[in-house]
C-alpha cells in the first residue's frame, strides 16, 4: 500500500463531489458519486457519469453499503464490452444524488443494504423507465416475492455467478425476466392469494335474516315484519341487530342501501321488474328467502335505484 493511503473506501460524498483517493490495488477508481474510470487512462475530464468506453451502451448503478463488494462489482461490470459506464452508491440518499440527471438504464441493488426494498420502490417512482435488479437475494420464496412486490425487474441469488448476473441484466433490458420454474410457481400462488384478498366480501345472512332484510327493503316496520313472519317483535329486533352488525352499519336504511349496492345490476327497475313500490308495500305471498345476498341462492331482489331521505334516516320499530 502506498504511503499515506488510509485504506478506507471512497464513500459517496453527501455534497455530490467526485473527490477521493484511488485504490492502488485496482485499475478501477470508484469516486464519491461512483462513476467508474480507468486509472491507466487517467481522468480525462469527462462529465460525471460519462461512458468509460466507446463500444458499450449500458449505463449501470450499483447500490451496496459494503465498500469492498461495491468496488469489486463495479470493476467486473466495467470490463463487460456492452457496459458504457458504472456508477456506485452506498445508500438511498447517495443513489438519489447519482441518478439526478444521469442516463442510468439499470440499478443493481444489494438486498443486504438497509432500506433496499424501499429504494427499489423509490426508483420506480422517481425514474419509471429505469429498471432495477436485486442482487444477493436469499433462495427463499418469501424474499423473492418481497423483491418482486417492491418492483424489481429481476433478481440474482447469493449462490448465482457473475455470468448469471449479466444474463439477468441483459434479459431485463430486453424486456424479459429470468425466473426458475419453482419461483414461477411461488409467484402464481402469491397472485392467487392476492386475488382472494381483493375479492369483495359479501356478508352471509341466515335465511331468516335475509327474509327480514327483504321486508325492510319494502318499507315494513319491525312490527309489520313480525306480523308477516308470525314471530315475536323482540325476535325481529334481534334479527335487525344481527343484520346491522354483519353489514357493519348502524341504521337499517344503511343496511338496505348497502345490499342494494351489492345487488345493483342483477335486478333494476320498479315494481314491474320485481322491485318495490311505495312505502309499506310488501311482496305478495309468503317470504321464502329465495334470492338473498351472500348465499348460493342468488342476490337480493331490488327495484328502487334510490331511497327517500326519510327512510335512510329512520329507525322504525
Image (cartoon, rainbow, N blue to C red):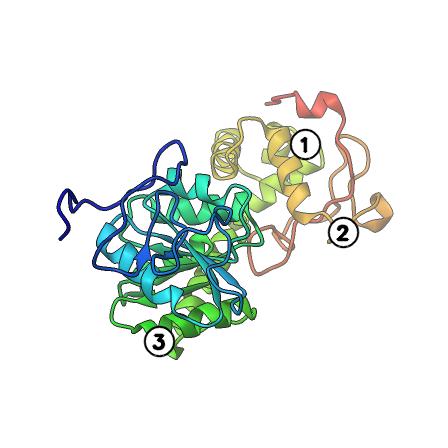
Residue 142 visible in the snapshot: no
> Disc 3 vs disc 1: which is toward the camera?
3
Q: Quadrant of residue 303?
A: top right
Question: Separation of disc 1 and disc 2 at Cα?
Answer: 21 Å
The residue shown at (39%, 59%) is 41
Query: Which comes before the other along the chain, label 3 or label 2?
Result: 3
Q: How many marks?
A: 3
Checking the image for residue 220, the label placed there is: 1
Question: Dot 1 surroundings within 10 Å: few (below 14), some, or many (20 or more)?
Answer: many
> Disc 3 vs disc 2: which is toward the camera?
3
Question: Separation of disc 3 and disc 2 at Cα?
Answer: 61 Å
Query: Which comes before the other along the chain, label 1 or label 2?
Result: 1
Front position in the image: 200 or 117:
117
Q: Is residue 201 above or below residue 315?
A: below
Q: Locate residue 29, reporting x and y percent.
A: 32, 53
Question: Dot 2 surroundings within 10 Å: few (below 14), some, or many (20 or more)?
Answer: some
Asked if disc 3 and disc 2 are in contact, CB closer than 8 Å, the reply is no
Query: Which comes before the other along the chain, label 3 or label 1?
Result: 3
Of all residues shown, which one is farthest toward the bottom?
181
Amino acid at each position: 500500500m502506498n504511503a499515506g493511503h488510509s485504506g478506507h473506501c471512497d464513500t459517496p460524498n453527501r455534497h455530490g463531489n467526485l473527490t477521493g483517493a484511488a485504490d492502488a490495488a485496482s485499475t478501477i477508481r470508484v469516486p464519491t458519486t461512483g462513476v467508474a474510470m480507468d486509472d491507466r487512462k487517467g481522468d480525462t475530464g469527462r462529465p460525471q457519469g460519462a461512458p468509460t468506453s466507446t463500444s458499450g451502451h449500458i449505463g449501470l448503478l450499483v447500490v451496496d453499503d459494503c465498500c469492498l463488494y461495491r468496488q469489486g462489482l463495479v470493476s467486473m461490470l466495467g470490463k463487460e464490452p456492452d457496459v458504457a459506464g458504472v456508477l456506485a452508491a452506498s445508500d438511498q440518499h447517495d443513489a438519489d444524488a447519482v441518478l439526478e440527471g444521469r442516463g442510468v438504464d439499470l440499478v443493481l441493488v444489494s438486498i443486504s443494504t438497509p432500506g433496499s426494498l424501499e429504494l427499489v420502490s423509490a426508483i420506480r417512482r422517481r425514474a419509471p423507465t429505469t429498471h432495477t435488479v436485486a442482487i444477493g437475494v436469499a433462495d427463499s420464496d418469501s424474499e423473492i416475492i418481497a423483491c418482486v412486490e417492491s418492483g424489481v425487474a429481476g433478481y440474482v441469488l447469493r449462490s448465482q455467478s457473475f455470468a448469471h448476473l449479466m444474463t439477468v441484466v441483459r434479459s431485463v433490458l430486453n424486456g424479459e425476466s429470468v425466473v426458475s420454474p419453482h419461483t414461477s410457481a411461488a409467484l402464481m400462488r402469491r397472485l392467487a392469494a392476492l386475488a382472494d384478498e381483493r375479492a369483495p366480501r359479501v356478508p352471509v345472512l341466515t335465511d331468516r335474516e335475509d327474509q327480514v332484510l327483504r321486508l325492510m327493503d319494502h318499507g315494513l316496520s319491525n312490527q309489520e315484519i313480525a306480523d308477516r313472519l308470525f314471530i315475536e317483535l323482540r325476535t325481529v329486533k334481534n334479527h335487525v341487530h344481527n343484520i346491522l352488525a354483519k353489514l357493519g352499519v348502524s341504521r337499517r336504511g344503511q343496511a338496505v342501501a348497502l345490499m342494494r349496492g351489492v345487488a345493483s345490476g342483477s335486478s333494476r327497475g320498479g315494481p314491474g321488474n320485481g322491485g318495490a313500490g311505495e312505502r309499506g308495500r310488501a311482496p305478495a305471498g309468503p317470504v321464502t328467502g329465495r334470492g338473498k345476498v351472500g348465499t348460493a341462492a342468488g342476490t337480493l331482489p331490488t327495484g328502487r335505484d334510490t331511497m327517500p331521505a326519510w327512510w335512510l334516516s329512520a329507525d322504525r320499530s
